Amino acid sequence: AQVLEESGGGSVQAGGSLRLSCVAYGFTYSRWCMGWFRQAAGKEREGVAVIFTFPFRGATYYADSVKGRFSISQDSAKNTLYLQMDSLKPEDTAMYYCAAAGNDLCHTRLNPPSEYDSWGQGTQVTVSS
């Protein structure tokens, strides 16, 4: 079974940092996009950051709202995706999801949630002012 397990969410004050992790199990894609998405209460799920990870590491793409504050990375040896979040703002409060897709649609842009077929259970991030 293909499983994505997120961890690392929590509650922080504005200006603080968190690092989210996502471990992938059971994936055998020949090409692979991974990304972080978030959904705030009453809003649609939106893209935060994506990375083309296999068969070669490609460019990363970020939502304008997080550029310069968030950083996506991966450790292929550990099958783990990370999202380093610095200078957090109250508007970053949301449930954060890790996602994977067996395609290369993230290779040139921050592609939408509809292009991902595997999702984690989510981890809550709450930023207080």
Image (spheres, rainbow, N blue to C red):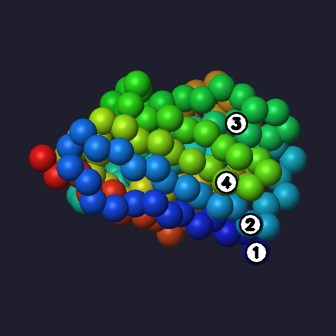
The amino acid on which the numbered mark 2 sits, given as a three-letter code, is: Tyr
The amino acid on which the numbered mark 3 sits, given as a three-letter code, is: Phe
Q: Secondary structure at mark 3?
A: strand
Q: Position of residue 46 (x, y in %)?
A: 41, 45
Seen in the picture, residue 52 relative to 82 is either above or below; the reply is above
Crowding at dot 4, Cα within 10 Å, few <14 / some 14-19 / many 20+, comes out as some
Query: In this orientation, does residue 16 appear?
Result: yes
Residue 112, numbered circle: none
Q: Which residue is mark 4?
A: 80
N-terminal label among 3 and 4: 3
Q: Which residue is mark 3?
A: 52
Residue 25, numbered circle: 2
N-terminal label among 3 and 2: 2
Residue at (69, 61) in percent of width and height: 24
In front: label 1 or label 4: 4
**In this rendering, would 54 be left or right of 116?**
right
